[in-house]
Amino acid sequence: MPGKVETTTDEKTTKSAYVGAVPHLQAEALMSLGPPNNCGNVPSIRLFLLKYNAFPCTIYCSGDDTSALLHATTIIDYIRDELKHDLTTDRISRNYHRQTKQMYIDSRFADLGNGMMIELSDSYFITDVQNPNKLKPDNSEDYFLIPSQVIIYYLPEHDTYVQELAQRFSKMTVFSSKSCTLQMVCRNQHGYYLNSIDIKKPLITDLALHYGKNFVSTHSKIIKNLNKKESKGIVLLHGIPGSGKTHYIRYLIHEIEEKTLIYVPPDMAKEISSPEFLPFLMQYQNSILIIEDAENIIKDRNESILPSQAVANLLNLSDGLLGDAMHQQIIATFNCDLTTIDPALLRKGRLIANYEFNKLDLESSKILSDKLGFGTENILEPMTLAEVYNQGEKPEEEDDEESDKKEKKTVPTENVSTTNESK
């Protein structure tokens, strides 16, 4: 990618075959061609017309993920240092940030030369972010300056270069700490009720890296079905402890739109067999029921001495007459073997998806560990998602041993010498 770019010449503009070029118009005529100027905003296209006698092509820059936010300061530093651009030539506007008690640049318009201009507009400060790219914050309180929009205006001969530039900008991001609301089932002496809890979205920018390439198509199928209106069915997520089932659900619920998410905690799962539970759920049509650690209520009824009513209720909700009326879907997680659950739950037409989570292979474990900042030295075998994420935590046994050592070191030396003398 080139450094400082040269200013385009009038001769090049005059000879251009570009359909947006207007080389022979005077300034007043050029100004009339540009879009109306909104009060307070930079007349970007008009300025481009005046400078280069052509309507610009445009590219809107964004991050690689829906929760990715471009960092204005990192982009500006790149333009200054790598493209050798003089920032003192930019048109800027400043605003005052009350929390940090400082003035900041909320908009910037820069001419990079050679038929390229860039605009960062309506920037704002944010502090509740995840920063996996380890970008430098804008002050000591970890505030990051985020532009609402980044647009590059350019002549068509720079299309490839500008796409590469936008791709570089897409990596200069922090991630918003989004949260969504789960409605947790609770019970008191008056019956069942829902209590709101906020769940933050985990930072998963690559599902294949976290769960394997085969899971990506399964995720797409799950999302497509759960976002259907007036739909039904059941999603079964199972596998060894620590393989990332709950982590995935935290991510999944942020991808679901316009549905009530009802969370049934493990200690309340048995309530699904209660006669009062179904009438309670009938208040929440077109919702999604999330049941964690559901193994005790989905076991094969033929293998139980006292078959649970819970399985029958789940079957009715997911594909029975009740499901037709209520349009409720179910997500259930469990750790037991798939062969132990009731086969009726696996029937075609009822089952949206069935996926077994397992350990990541050695190569994926190393890549994820390195991406999280742990390096790869300690990755010697396939690992669960929990093992990769929690590498920095010491086992309880090690903590106990260190505590014992500290206690031994604090034994007073005077007592030891006295004991020796008495001997």
Image (cartoon, rainbow, N blue to C red):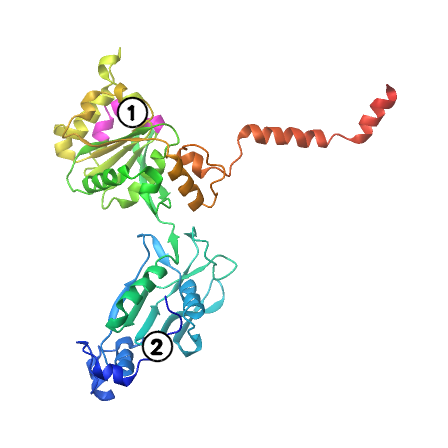
Residue beneath the point at 24% across and 82% down: 13
Q: Nearer the viewer, residue 92 or 20?
A: 20
The N terminus lies in quadrant: bottom left
Residue 100, image x, y percentages? 49, 63
Residue 39, image x, y percentages? 29, 77
Which mark, residue 271?
1
The span from disc 2 to disc 1 (Cα, nearest Å) is 68 Å
- What is the total number of numbered labels drawn onto the structure image? 2
Q: Nearer the viewer, residue 132 or 106?
A: 132
Residue type at the position of mark 1: Glu
Give the mark nearer the N terminus: 2 vs 1: 2
Residue beneath the point at 40% across and 38% down: 365
Q: Quadrant of residue 135?
A: bottom left
Q: Is residue 358 left or right of residue 29?
A: right
Position of residue 391 relative to residue 62, above or below, is: above
Position of residue 189 relative to residue 181, above or below, is: above
Residue beneath the point at 27% across and 19% down: 340
Residue at mark 2: 113
Position of residue 152 relative to residue 243, above or below, is: below
Residue type at the position of mark 2: Gly
In what element is the residue under mark 2? loop
| Magenta residues (range) | 266-280
Position of residue 127 relative to residue 181, above or below, is: below
Asked if one can make out residue 196 in the rendered structure from this viewpoint, the answer is no
Crowd around label 2: few <14 · some 14–19 · many ≥20 (10 Å): some
Residue 328, image x, y percentages? 19, 35
